[in-house]
Every structure is written in C-alpha cells, then in structure tokens.
Image (cartoon, grey):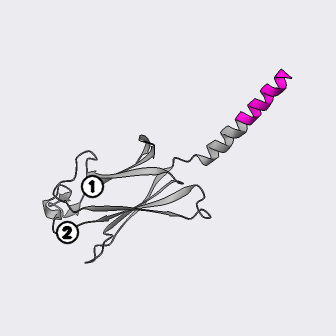
Amino acid sequence: MHSSSCITAAITLLITLQTTASIVNWDLLYQSVDTDFREGATDDITLTYMIGAQREYSIALYASDCETSITGMPSLSIVPKISQDYELHPLHDQLDVVIDIDFTEILSSNIWDESNDTLKFCSVVHLLSGVEVIKEE
C-alpha cells in the first residue's frame, strides 16, 4: 500500500507540473514600432510587444543608453494598452505602448539628436511577479 500511494503522489505531481508549465508563459517579444507624427495625433509612437497572457508588467523610457532618464520633456505621455485574441494567440496578450510627444519640447530634450534630426530613446518593459522582475526587454 505504501508504494501505491507514492506512485499516485508522483503521478499527481507530474500532472500538476505539466499543467502548470503549459499555463505559465513569461514570453516578452518585441513586435514592431509604428509612428504617426501628423498634427493632433496622440499616438505619435506605438511600440508593440507580445507578452505572456495576463502578466503584470512595467514600462520605462530612457535616453538611448537605456539608463539615463529622459530630460527636457515634462509632458511625455506613455499609455499602455492590452488586447487579447486568445483564439489567434491563446498564450499571449498584445501590449501596445503608446507614446505621445510634445514636439515643442523635443529640441530641448536629451533624446533628440540635432546633428541628424533623429529621436533616440530606449523602452524597457519588465514582466513582473509581484515586485520581482522575471523578464526584461
């Protein structure tokens, strides 16, 4: 009887681990960047990621070195939007990071490269478990 209960416990543990492994998804996959710089647009830049379904996340923008805070743009706006299509992507949510830039401030910021008129910044997305960072892109 003792060995039978050990086998049952091992099978139960194995089934639980397999089920949990198939549900837990920590994917963080960069997909694309889209821009819309028309006057009046509020979604100037949209960064799209596929992330594990129903994951907590955080987003931060930095200068191009991915460490220095952005300066000179006090009204920089970041709006995350999550969408799901579980029929098409059953294990993923789509995270769109929508950035609205005040172009009157851009020339005084540290993300504008005046020598070649380009905007350079770094987006950092974290997948979180509570306060612990599990994955970073």
In the rendered image, which quarter contains the N terminus? top right
Residue 37: % across, % down: 28, 73
In the rendered structure, the answer to whether residue 33 lies left or right of residue 67 reads right
Mark 2 residue crowding within 10 angstroms, few (<14) / some (14–19) / many (20+): few
Q: Nearer the viewer, mark 2 or mark 1?
A: 2
Label 2 sits on residue: 103
Mark 1 residue crowding within 10 angstroms, few (<14) / some (14–19) / many (20+): some
Magenta residue span: 1-13
Tell me which residue sits at (30%, 69%) in the image.
44
Tell me which residue sits at (83%, 21%) in the image.
2
In the rendered structure, the answer to whether residue 38 lies left or right of residue 81 reads left
- Which amino acid type is shown beneath numbered disc 1? Phe
Residue 132: % across, % down: 42, 39
Say the numbered circle drawn on residue 121: 1
Secondary structure at badge 1 equals strand
Name the residue nearer the viewer: 88 or 80: 80
- For the image, the number of numbered tags is 2
Tell me which residue sits at (28%, 47%) in the image.
66
In reply to whether residue 3 is colored magenta, the answer given is yes
